[in-house]
Amino acid sequence: MEGIVAVTYRCNARCYMCNTWQHPSPKTEEVTPAEVAKIPSGLKFCNITGGEPFLREDLGEIVDVVKSKADRVVISTNGYFTDRVVALARKHCDIGIRVSLEGLPAANDELRGIPDGFDHGLRTIIELKHMGLKDIGFGITVSDRNAKDLLELYKLALSMDLEFATAVTHNAYYFHKFDNEFKDPDMIAKEFLKLVQELFRTRKPKSWFRAYFNYYLVNKVYGGKRPLSCECGTDLFVVDPFAKVKPCNALDVEMGDLRTQSFDEIWNSDRAREIRAQVATCDRQCWMIGSAAPAMKKALWTPVQWILKNRRSFLNASEGELFELSAEFRPRGETLGDNAGE
Ligand code: SF4
Ligand code: SF4
Protein backbone atom coordinates (compact mmCIF):
# COMPACT_ATOMS: atom_id res chain seq x y z
CA MET A 1 0.00 0.00 0.00
CA GLU A 2 1.08 3.57 -0.71
CA GLY A 3 0.11 6.85 0.93
CA ILE A 4 -0.13 10.55 0.20
CA VAL A 5 -0.10 13.04 3.08
CA ALA A 6 -1.14 16.58 2.16
CA VAL A 7 0.15 18.57 5.11
CA THR A 8 -1.27 22.00 4.25
CA TYR A 9 -3.43 23.89 1.74
CA ARG A 10 -1.40 27.03 2.34
CA CYS A 11 0.73 27.97 -0.65
CA ASN A 12 3.09 30.76 -1.66
CA ALA A 13 2.51 30.09 -5.39
CA ARG A 14 -0.33 31.46 -7.52
CA CYS A 15 -0.64 28.77 -10.17
CA TYR A 16 -3.01 29.42 -13.08
CA MET A 17 -4.59 25.95 -12.79
CA CYS A 18 -5.15 25.93 -9.04
CA ASN A 19 -6.82 28.26 -6.54
CA THR A 20 -5.76 26.35 -3.44
CA TRP A 21 -3.77 29.38 -2.35
CA GLN A 22 -7.06 31.33 -2.10
CA HIS A 23 -8.42 28.71 0.31
CA PRO A 24 -5.59 28.10 2.79
CA SER A 25 -6.06 25.63 5.62
CA PRO A 26 -5.92 27.48 8.96
CA LYS A 27 -2.53 26.72 10.50
CA THR A 28 -4.07 25.67 13.82
CA GLU A 29 -6.36 23.12 12.16
CA GLU A 30 -3.70 21.31 10.14
CA VAL A 31 -2.95 17.63 10.64
CA THR A 32 -0.42 17.17 13.48
CA PRO A 33 2.61 14.84 13.52
CA ALA A 34 0.78 12.74 16.17
CA GLU A 35 -2.19 12.32 13.80
CA VAL A 36 0.11 11.44 10.91
CA ALA A 37 1.64 8.81 13.20
CA LYS A 38 -1.66 6.90 12.92
CA ILE A 39 -1.00 5.90 9.30
CA PRO A 40 0.03 2.25 8.98
CA SER A 41 3.62 1.00 9.01
CA GLY A 42 5.13 -1.03 6.20
CA LEU A 43 4.13 1.33 3.37
CA LYS A 44 6.17 0.96 0.20
CA PHE A 45 5.97 4.67 -0.59
CA CYS A 46 4.59 7.88 0.84
CA ASN A 47 4.39 11.28 -0.82
CA ILE A 48 4.27 14.41 1.33
CA THR A 49 2.57 17.21 -0.53
CA GLY A 50 0.46 20.36 -0.14
CA GLY A 51 -0.15 23.27 -0.89
CA GLU A 52 3.48 23.99 -0.21
CA PRO A 53 4.75 21.56 2.47
CA PHE A 54 7.74 23.73 3.37
CA LEU A 55 5.38 26.35 4.83
CA ARG A 56 4.91 23.92 7.74
CA GLU A 57 7.34 24.85 10.50
CA ASP A 58 7.07 21.31 11.90
CA LEU A 59 7.64 19.55 8.57
CA GLY A 60 10.79 17.90 9.99
CA GLU A 61 8.68 16.20 12.69
CA ILE A 62 6.20 14.98 10.09
CA VAL A 63 9.04 13.61 7.97
CA ASP A 64 10.43 11.76 11.02
CA VAL A 65 7.04 10.10 11.46
CA VAL A 66 6.46 9.27 7.79
CA LYS A 67 9.97 7.85 7.40
CA SER A 68 9.22 5.40 10.21
CA LYS A 69 6.19 4.20 8.22
CA ALA A 70 7.36 4.03 4.61
CA ASP A 71 10.33 2.54 2.74
CA ARG A 72 10.56 5.60 0.49
CA VAL A 73 9.39 9.17 1.18
CA VAL A 74 9.22 11.91 -1.45
CA ILE A 75 8.25 15.54 -0.79
CA SER A 76 6.65 17.55 -3.61
CA THR A 77 7.48 21.26 -3.42
CA ASN A 78 7.66 24.33 -5.61
CA GLY A 79 11.25 24.63 -4.36
CA TYR A 80 10.97 28.31 -3.48
CA PHE A 81 12.32 28.03 0.05
CA THR A 82 15.78 26.75 -0.82
CA ASP A 83 17.19 27.14 2.71
CA ARG A 84 14.35 25.16 4.28
CA VAL A 85 14.58 22.35 1.73
CA VAL A 86 18.35 22.10 2.10
CA ALA A 87 18.16 22.15 5.93
CA LEU A 88 15.64 19.30 5.91
CA ALA A 89 17.65 17.31 3.36
CA ARG A 90 20.76 17.68 5.57
CA LYS A 91 18.91 15.84 8.32
CA HIS A 92 17.26 13.32 6.00
CA CYS A 93 19.68 12.48 3.22
CA ASP A 94 17.56 9.46 2.17
CA ILE A 95 14.52 11.58 1.37
CA GLY A 96 13.25 12.30 -2.16
CA ILE A 97 12.46 15.83 -3.36
CA ARG A 98 10.45 16.72 -6.49
CA VAL A 99 10.53 20.38 -7.46
CA SER A 100 7.48 21.30 -9.53
CA LEU A 101 8.42 23.52 -12.45
CA GLU A 102 5.97 24.38 -15.22
CA GLY A 103 8.61 24.73 -17.91
CA LEU A 104 11.62 26.92 -18.60
CA PRO A 105 11.94 30.27 -16.74
CA ALA A 106 9.42 32.38 -18.72
CA ALA A 107 6.66 29.76 -18.75
CA ASN A 108 7.27 28.66 -15.18
CA ASP A 109 7.22 32.13 -13.65
CA GLU A 110 4.13 33.15 -15.63
CA LEU A 111 2.17 29.97 -14.91
CA ARG A 112 3.18 29.60 -11.26
CA GLY A 113 2.85 33.27 -10.44
CA ILE A 114 5.98 33.38 -8.26
CA PRO A 115 8.60 35.97 -9.29
CA ASP A 116 11.90 34.16 -9.93
CA GLY A 117 10.21 30.85 -9.16
CA PHE A 118 12.31 28.94 -11.71
CA ASP A 119 15.47 30.50 -10.33
CA HIS A 120 14.57 29.40 -6.78
CA GLY A 121 13.51 25.91 -7.90
CA LEU A 122 16.70 25.36 -9.87
CA ARG A 123 18.88 26.70 -7.04
CA THR A 124 17.18 24.26 -4.68
CA ILE A 125 17.93 21.36 -7.02
CA ILE A 126 21.54 22.49 -7.55
CA GLU A 127 22.10 22.66 -3.77
CA LEU A 128 20.54 19.22 -3.23
CA LYS A 129 22.62 17.76 -6.05
CA HIS A 130 25.76 19.30 -4.58
CA MET A 131 24.91 17.73 -1.20
CA GLY A 132 24.74 14.34 -2.87
CA LEU A 133 21.00 13.74 -2.44
CA LYS A 134 20.09 10.90 -4.80
CA ASP A 135 16.30 10.95 -5.19
CA ILE A 136 15.72 14.42 -6.66
CA GLY A 137 13.95 15.65 -9.75
CA PHE A 138 11.59 18.00 -11.52
CA GLY A 139 7.84 17.59 -11.83
CA ILE A 140 5.78 19.29 -14.54
CA THR A 141 2.01 19.58 -15.01
CA VAL A 142 1.45 19.93 -18.74
CA SER A 143 -1.24 22.09 -20.35
CA ASP A 144 -1.64 23.99 -23.65
CA ARG A 145 0.43 26.77 -22.15
CA ASN A 146 3.62 24.88 -21.36
CA ALA A 147 3.58 21.71 -23.52
CA LYS A 148 6.25 23.22 -25.78
CA ASP A 149 8.67 23.29 -22.82
CA LEU A 150 8.12 19.64 -21.89
CA LEU A 151 11.01 18.20 -23.89
CA GLU A 152 13.44 20.95 -22.93
CA LEU A 153 12.72 20.50 -19.22
CA TYR A 154 13.19 16.75 -19.64
CA LYS A 155 16.55 17.34 -21.37
CA LEU A 156 17.62 19.64 -18.55
CA ALA A 157 16.64 16.94 -16.03
CA LEU A 158 18.51 14.31 -18.05
CA SER A 159 21.65 16.42 -18.32
CA MET A 160 21.64 16.88 -14.53
CA ASP A 161 20.86 13.18 -13.94
CA LEU A 162 17.53 14.01 -12.26
CA GLU A 163 14.20 12.21 -12.14
CA PHE A 164 11.44 13.68 -14.29
CA ALA A 165 7.80 13.41 -13.20
CA THR A 166 4.90 14.39 -15.44
CA ALA A 167 1.19 15.04 -15.11
CA VAL A 168 -1.43 16.77 -17.22
CA THR A 169 -3.58 19.57 -15.95
CA HIS A 170 -6.82 18.45 -14.34
CA ASN A 171 -9.51 19.60 -11.94
CA ALA A 172 -9.66 18.60 -8.28
CA TYR A 173 -11.85 19.71 -5.39
CA TYR A 174 -8.93 21.16 -3.47
CA PHE A 175 -7.88 23.28 -6.49
CA HIS A 176 -11.24 25.10 -6.18
CA LYS A 177 -11.07 25.37 -9.95
CA PHE A 178 -13.11 23.24 -12.31
CA ASP A 179 -12.56 24.64 -15.80
CA ASN A 180 -9.07 23.37 -16.61
CA GLU A 181 -9.23 21.87 -20.10
CA PHE A 182 -7.13 21.05 -23.15
CA LYS A 183 -7.72 23.38 -26.10
CA ASP A 184 -5.19 21.80 -28.47
CA PRO A 185 -4.89 18.10 -27.57
CA ASP A 186 -3.02 17.27 -30.81
CA MET A 187 -0.24 19.70 -29.98
CA ILE A 188 0.07 18.37 -26.42
CA ALA A 189 -0.01 14.78 -27.73
CA LYS A 190 2.86 15.49 -30.14
CA GLU A 191 5.04 16.85 -27.34
CA PHE A 192 4.33 13.85 -25.10
CA LEU A 193 5.08 11.43 -27.94
CA LYS A 194 8.48 13.07 -28.43
CA LEU A 195 9.08 12.54 -24.71
CA VAL A 196 8.07 8.88 -25.00
CA GLN A 197 10.60 8.48 -27.82
CA GLU A 198 13.34 10.12 -25.73
CA LEU A 199 12.53 7.90 -22.75
CA PHE A 200 12.89 4.84 -24.98
CA ARG A 201 16.26 6.13 -26.20
CA THR A 202 17.75 5.68 -22.73
CA ARG A 203 19.06 2.31 -21.66
CA LYS A 204 17.12 2.42 -18.38
CA PRO A 205 14.11 0.07 -18.12
CA LYS A 206 12.72 2.45 -15.46
CA SER A 207 12.47 5.11 -18.19
CA TRP A 208 10.63 2.66 -20.45
CA PHE A 209 7.95 2.27 -17.76
CA ARG A 210 7.78 6.04 -17.70
CA ALA A 211 7.32 5.90 -21.47
CA TYR A 212 4.25 3.73 -20.87
CA PHE A 213 2.92 6.17 -18.26
CA ASN A 214 3.47 9.16 -20.56
CA TYR A 215 1.97 7.39 -23.57
CA TYR A 216 -1.25 6.99 -21.59
CA LEU A 217 -1.11 10.66 -20.59
CA VAL A 218 -1.74 11.23 -24.31
CA ASN A 219 -4.82 9.03 -23.95
CA LYS A 220 -5.87 11.14 -20.95
CA VAL A 221 -5.45 14.36 -22.93
CA TYR A 222 -7.87 12.96 -25.54
CA GLY A 223 -10.33 11.98 -22.79
CA GLY A 224 -9.78 8.21 -23.02
CA LYS A 225 -10.30 5.58 -20.33
CA ARG A 226 -7.34 4.71 -18.11
CA PRO A 227 -5.69 1.44 -19.21
CA LEU A 228 -5.52 -0.07 -15.70
CA SER A 229 -8.28 -0.03 -13.12
CA CYS A 230 -8.08 2.50 -10.31
CA GLU A 231 -7.46 0.90 -6.91
CA CYS A 232 -7.54 4.06 -4.81
CA GLY A 233 -8.92 3.41 -1.35
CA THR A 234 -7.42 -0.11 -1.54
CA ASP A 235 -3.81 0.28 -2.68
CA LEU A 236 -3.59 4.01 -1.96
CA PHE A 237 -4.89 6.38 0.71
CA VAL A 238 -4.69 10.13 1.10
CA VAL A 239 -4.60 12.07 4.36
CA ASP A 240 -5.71 15.67 3.83
CA PRO A 241 -4.56 18.71 5.86
CA PHE A 242 -7.58 18.28 8.18
CA ALA A 243 -6.59 14.68 9.07
CA LYS A 244 -9.37 13.20 6.94
CA VAL A 245 -8.60 9.91 5.17
CA LYS A 246 -9.67 9.83 1.51
CA PRO A 247 -9.20 7.30 -1.30
CA CYS A 248 -7.43 9.77 -3.60
CA ASN A 249 -6.96 13.51 -3.94
CA ALA A 250 -9.47 13.94 -6.74
CA LEU A 251 -12.63 12.41 -5.25
CA ASP A 252 -14.02 14.57 -2.44
CA VAL A 253 -15.22 11.80 -0.14
CA GLU A 254 -14.06 10.92 3.37
CA MET A 255 -13.43 7.42 4.65
CA GLY A 256 -12.84 8.70 8.18
CA ASP A 257 -11.04 11.12 10.48
CA LEU A 258 -7.64 10.45 12.08
CA ARG A 259 -8.52 13.02 14.75
CA THR A 260 -11.13 10.73 16.28
CA GLN A 261 -10.47 7.27 14.81
CA SER A 262 -7.60 4.85 14.37
CA PHE A 263 -6.47 4.06 10.81
CA ASP A 264 -7.64 0.45 11.17
CA GLU A 265 -11.10 1.57 12.28
CA ILE A 266 -11.34 3.82 9.23
CA TRP A 267 -9.92 1.30 6.76
CA ASN A 268 -12.22 -1.53 7.85
CA SER A 269 -15.37 0.58 8.22
CA ASP A 270 -18.63 0.29 6.25
CA ARG A 271 -17.96 3.82 4.99
CA ALA A 272 -14.61 2.69 3.54
CA ARG A 273 -16.36 -0.23 1.81
CA GLU A 274 -18.98 2.13 0.32
CA ILE A 275 -16.23 4.38 -0.97
CA ARG A 276 -14.38 1.45 -2.54
CA ALA A 277 -17.59 0.63 -4.42
CA GLN A 278 -17.70 4.27 -5.57
CA VAL A 279 -14.09 4.05 -6.75
CA ALA A 280 -14.91 0.89 -8.72
CA THR A 281 -17.49 2.81 -10.77
CA CYS A 282 -15.69 6.18 -10.81
CA ASP A 283 -15.70 7.56 -14.36
CA ARG A 284 -13.12 10.31 -13.93
CA GLN A 285 -10.40 8.18 -15.53
CA CYS A 286 -7.53 9.97 -13.76
CA TRP A 287 -4.07 9.01 -14.93
CA MET A 288 -1.76 10.49 -12.32
CA ILE A 289 1.35 8.85 -11.02
CA GLY A 290 -0.07 8.55 -7.48
CA SER A 291 -2.77 6.11 -8.58
CA ALA A 292 -1.14 4.83 -11.78
CA ALA A 293 2.13 3.64 -10.17
CA PRO A 294 0.49 1.16 -7.76
CA ALA A 295 -1.72 -0.08 -10.62
CA MET A 296 1.32 -0.54 -12.89
CA LYS A 297 3.18 -2.46 -10.19
CA LYS A 298 0.17 -4.70 -9.62
CA ALA A 299 -0.42 -5.42 -13.31
CA LEU A 300 3.28 -5.38 -14.22
CA TRP A 301 2.86 -7.59 -17.27
CA THR A 302 0.62 -5.01 -18.99
CA PRO A 303 3.27 -2.25 -19.22
CA VAL A 304 5.97 -4.87 -19.93
CA GLN A 305 3.99 -6.20 -22.91
CA TRP A 306 3.38 -2.67 -24.17
CA ILE A 307 7.11 -1.87 -23.91
CA LEU A 308 8.10 -5.06 -25.76
CA LYS A 309 5.57 -4.35 -28.50
CA ASN A 310 6.20 -0.63 -29.00
CA ARG A 311 9.79 0.30 -28.16
CA ARG A 312 11.17 -0.40 -31.61
CA SER A 313 8.37 1.53 -33.36
CA PHE A 314 9.02 4.58 -31.22
CA LEU A 315 12.77 4.39 -31.72
CA ASN A 316 12.40 4.21 -35.51
CA ALA A 317 9.62 6.78 -35.92
CA SER A 318 10.10 10.15 -37.62
CA GLU A 319 8.32 13.13 -36.02
CA GLY A 320 5.30 12.66 -38.32
CA GLU A 321 5.15 8.92 -37.73
CA LEU A 322 5.27 9.49 -33.97
CA PHE A 323 1.87 11.19 -34.06
CA GLU A 324 0.40 8.20 -35.89
CA LEU A 325 1.58 5.93 -33.07
CA SER A 326 -1.13 7.43 -30.88
CA ALA A 327 -3.89 7.02 -33.52
CA GLU A 328 -5.70 4.53 -31.27
CA PHE A 329 -6.62 7.44 -28.99
CA ARG A 330 -8.23 9.41 -31.82
CA PRO A 331 -11.30 7.55 -33.08
CA ARG A 332 -11.66 7.86 -36.88
CA GLY A 333 -8.48 9.92 -36.87
CA GLU A 334 -10.29 12.90 -35.39
CA THR A 335 -9.38 14.99 -32.41
CA LEU A 336 -11.70 14.81 -29.43
CA GLY A 337 -11.40 18.52 -28.80
CA ASP A 338 -14.03 18.59 -26.08
CA ASN A 339 -11.97 17.06 -23.28
CA ALA A 340 -12.59 19.08 -20.17
CA GLY A 341 -9.83 17.74 -17.96
CA GLU A 342 -11.09 15.78 -14.95
S1 SF4 B 1 -0.64 23.82 -7.87
FE1 SF4 B 1 0.49 23.48 -5.97
S2 SF4 B 1 2.06 25.10 -5.98
FE2 SF4 B 1 0.46 25.76 -7.41
S3 SF4 B 1 -0.96 27.07 -6.23
FE3 SF4 B 1 -1.77 24.95 -6.23
S4 SF4 B 1 -0.97 24.06 -4.35
FE4 SF4 B 1 0.28 25.88 -4.78
S1 SF4 C 1 -10.40 7.61 -11.15
FE1 SF4 C 1 -11.79 8.25 -9.47
S2 SF4 C 1 -11.13 7.08 -7.68
FE2 SF4 C 1 -9.47 6.95 -9.18
S3 SF4 C 1 -8.06 8.66 -8.70
FE3 SF4 C 1 -9.57 9.45 -10.16
S4 SF4 C 1 -11.22 10.37 -8.95
FE4 SF4 C 1 -10.01 9.01 -7.60
Image: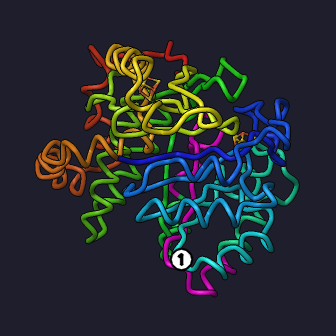
Residue 236 occupies quadrant:
top left
Please tell me whether residue 153 is drawn above or below residue 255 in the rendered image: below
| Amino acid type at image mark 1 | Met
Q: Which residue is pictured at 76% across the width and 33% down the height?
A: 20
Instruction: Examine the structure image and report whether residue 131 is included in the region drawn in magenta.
Output: yes
Instruction: Examine the structure image and report whether residue 302 is included in the region drawn in magenta.
Output: no
Residue 153 appears in view: no
Please tell me whether residue 288 is drawn above or below residue 256 in the rendered image: below
Residue 335, image x, y percentages: 41, 18
Residue 328 appears in view: yes
Q: Which residue is pictured at 84% across the width and 51% down the height?
A: 114
Q: Nearer the viewer, residue 193 or 130?
A: 130
Q: Which residue is mark 1?
A: 160
Q: Nearer the viewer, residue 267 or 324?
A: 267
Q: Which residues are magenta?
A: 126-151
Residue 176, image x, y percentages: 72, 23
Please tell me whether residue 285 is drawn above or below residue 235 in the rendered image: above
Classify mark 1: residues with Cα within 10 Å, few (<14), some (14-19) or many (20+).
Answer: few
For ligand 1, which image quadrant applies?
top right
Residue 9, image x, y percentages: 75, 39
Q: Which residue is pictured at 76% across the width and 61% down the height?
A: 58
